[in-house]
Image (cartoon, rainbow, N blue to C red):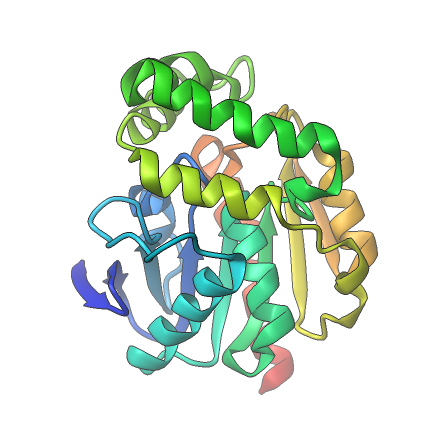
Amino acid sequence: MNRVRVAGADVREAGSGAPVLMLHGIGGAADAFAAQMSGFPGYRTLAWDAPGYGDSADLPGEPVLDDYAETVVSILRGLDAAPAHLLGVSWGGVIATRVALEAPDVLRSLVLADSSRGSGRTDRGRKAMATRVEELRRRGAVAFAEQRGPRLPAPDADPRAVEQVVGLMSRVRLTGYRNAAGVMAATDHSAQLASISTPTLVIVGEQDRVTGVDESRALADGIPAARFEVIRGAGHAANQEKPEEFNRRVRQFLSDVDGGAR
């Protein structure tokens, strides 16, 4: 596996073939896709540390969602990886949705995993983002992760998946997390989903207690011809909890898209 730096972001890279760029959730990092980096044979897999996460630089000032989407586009073009399949988990899916809305020419397909239309859809969602930032500030990253991380996987998830989720969350930086929470709180894609023309798969863990199955179903219902699938026994971190099943379903979707293109 190689690591490259482009547009201020640290990106993991493996394999060859049609590119698949993966965007992690608000409490994650590129390492959240360890099982996917080698799980899509025949594809060039890429996973970023989002701006403000891992080894990636913070975005300047108070970034908006378009700043993250523009970084994705810069990465794809900088790595000669456009058009690519774009896979976003949770917050990463919100960024991926914005890319599909603003720069569909850089995409082959869109995969939204355990994602949402944005936390700005409700007052409760906006307040939850502010509360999380304050908890992180008050507790510190390790205690914050120990308190919040176990809610992401399903209640009976493999302890190794829980450990991975908590470990990644314990590495978040306050500035990066605060910026991510801010753009989530300001986003509601509900009215724009119908204009997405990119082939889309919406996939969610059956026991997702964070964004939930109903929210993923709303995403799929709003995007024309989107495919909707549920992974039994998985929670919000479905790609980490049930990697074989997750990878199998995503591979089938990518194959269908690429087969149709050929």
Query: Which sits in the foreground, 53 or 38?
Result: 53
Which residue is at the far front? 61
Q: Position of residue 113 (x, y in %)?
A: 58, 46
Above or below for 237 versus 163: below
**x and y, in percent, of residue 165 in the image:** 38, 27
| Quadrant containing the N terminus in the rendered view | bottom left
Q: Quadrant of residue 223?
A: bottom right
Q: Residue at x 46, y 44 (%)?
A: 180
How many numbered marks appear? 0
Q: Quadrant of residue 260?
A: bottom right
Note whether residue 179 is visible.
yes
Q: Is residue 70 above or below residue 229?
A: below
Residue 211 seen anywhere in this rendered image of the structure: no
Measuring 35% from the left and 29% from the top, which residue is drawn there? 169
Q: Quadrant of the C terminus?
A: bottom right
Left or right: 166 as drawn, with respect to 85: left
Q: Nearer the viewer, residue 42 or 90?
A: 90
- Could you say where residue 39 lies in the image, as x and y percent from the top left? 38, 52
Q: Is 47 situated left or right of 207 in this image?
A: left
x, y percent for residue 25: 46, 42
Q: Is residue 255 found left or right of 122 in the rendered image?
A: left
Q: Front-most of 174 and 77?
A: 174
- Going 43% across and 35% down the picture, which residue do you hit? 240
